Image (cartoon, rainbow, N blue to C red):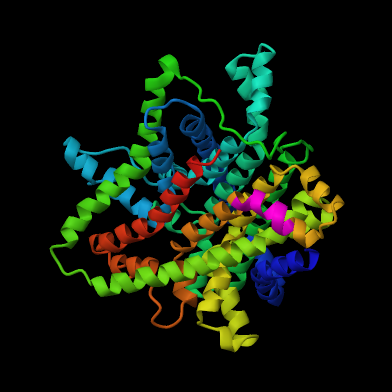
Amino acid sequence: MLLAAALVALVALLPLAYLAIVVGGDVDAARDSVWTSDALALLGRSTALAAAVTVTAIAIAVPLAWLTVRTDLPGRRLWAVLAALPLVIPSYIGAYLVVSALGPSGLAQDALGVDSLPSIYGFPGAWFVLTAFTYPYVLLPVQAVLRSLDPALEEAARGMGRSPWQAFRTVVLPQLVPAIGAGGLLVALYVLSDFGAVSILRFDSFTSVIYTTYRSSFDREGAAALACLLVALTVLVLWLEGRTRRARGTYARAAPGVQRRLPIVALGRWRWPALAFTGGVVGLTLVLPVAVLLYWSTKSFAGEVEWDVVAGAAGNSLLAAAVAAAVAATCAVPVALLAVRYAGRLSAGLERASFAGHALPGIVVALALVVVGTRAWPALYQTLAMLVLAYVVLFLPQAIGATRAALLRIDPHVEEAARSLGRTPLAVLRTITAPLARSGVVAGALLVFLTAVKELPATLLLAPIGFETLATEIFRTTESSFFERGAVPSLVLLAVSAIPLALLTIRSQDRP
């Protein structure tokens, strides 16, 4: 496991090695680029946006998870699926849809017949869009943990006279901390690495400045220095998330072999306010964007839709994302196992190193792999394997976070009992640990798939010649500001991503 985790961490550190080489070529220029008022302002804006989106996403996701798993909310199974679907909308599509609906001269302004609406650009717009399309990163793991909680703990608290709210606060909420931390970490890293939404909404952040500088190629050392500063911010985020896990608690079920369904909580007079909250979130984050896309698709049908091109792009997207999800889920297992079962400085260091690529813009990771491919492994350059490698480096933390949360739910005494009966460590991993952690591994693979199928900058640089995906097809049809031409590919992208997410969510609801 140690060797496997070290190899995974080494691959994840390739972009950092590239940055070190570029910055090392001209240290003085890099230092001058970092120690400026503009760079400090970028640091403050990016940090504020990441903090605001993470806190808001947690505030939305935790109540939604509770309502859709533990209460008698009307249609809670359907709401559980719908609340997770905003995850399939890429940030660059979501931002453009929000601008089209709520921006100047947008559909809402025309429908209301007013002269103007409050500006959606800048920090408020970026905050809204990124929160709307990232809160499922917290929702999905929290839902999974809520479905696997030991009901005996809550029943014992209620039997000792605690109110439902006291039982939730003192018994249930502490059990959700690992899942909330893992999901919140993914949200923060996603915000720090996002380029599409902040660019469309005219919010200057690290990623937009780094991307523009790299594309212009006028100041590669300065851009690399800014990327290193972004990595330092990522390390700080990882350290803060690690501090929340520093307290050693027990998260495993008391009786993992005797699982039963948790009791459903009656909302009573709060039933309809809860329904309004759930419907409002789904309406703003899913119904509104899809409605705008459908409107544009009717305009698109006035012209010709190249269905063969769209179908080929959909197949390529499925292939690349599925392979990346399988590889990332496999690579996440040794890293998560070391972090949970053999906690220490070495395992923590390997885990944090594996998160390195996730906070970097896709263009930085792609350029690093271009250098590696052209100089070290020319045979891999512009191949599907190189594209999959980029996806794994970028989105590996999603698989690690979900797998780690699942492993924390497994009582180590179960594995120790199997070892005492003569089973080898590999046999225990295959017959005990893997089946119990399967839901977390699959959830992590799903998150990687859903994110990889939307990835744009890395795909543009590393995809084989002629290998068009839905993301690149949407970019090609909308780069001339004719976004309605990309409505049909966008709807196909949403369908490709939504079907597996919906099936997995429905399946998870049937498990005790």
- Does 348 appear in magenta? no
Q: Is residue 1 above or below residue 264?
A: below
Q: Is residue 9 left or right of residue 89?
A: right
Q: Which residue is found at the position 69% from the left and 42% from the top?
A: 409
Q: Position of residue 470 (x, y in %)?
A: 36, 67
User: Please, what is the dominant secondary structure of the magenta stretch?
Assistant: helix
Is residue 321 visible from the viewing direction of this image? Answer: yes
Q: Is residue 41 left or right of residue 273?
A: right
Q: Is residue 31 above or below residue 197?
A: below
User: What residue range appears in magenta?
Assistant: 429-438
Q: Nearer the viewer, residue 314 or 467?
A: 314
- Does 435 appear in magenta? yes
Taking the view exactly as shown, the residue that stands out farthest to the front is 421
Q: Is residue 188 left or right of residue 412?
A: left
The quadrant of the rendering that contains the C terminus is top right
Q: Which residue is found at the position 60% from the left and 53% from the top?
A: 37
Q: Position of residue 264 (x, y in %)?
A: 51, 25
Q: Position of residue 210 (x, y in %)?
A: 53, 64
Q: Quadrant of residue 79?
A: top left
Q: Is residue 377 above or below residue 219?
A: below
Taking the view exactly as shown, the residue that stands out farthest to the top is 161
Q: Quadrant of residue 483?
A: bottom left
Is residue 226 visible from the viewing direction of this image? Answer: no
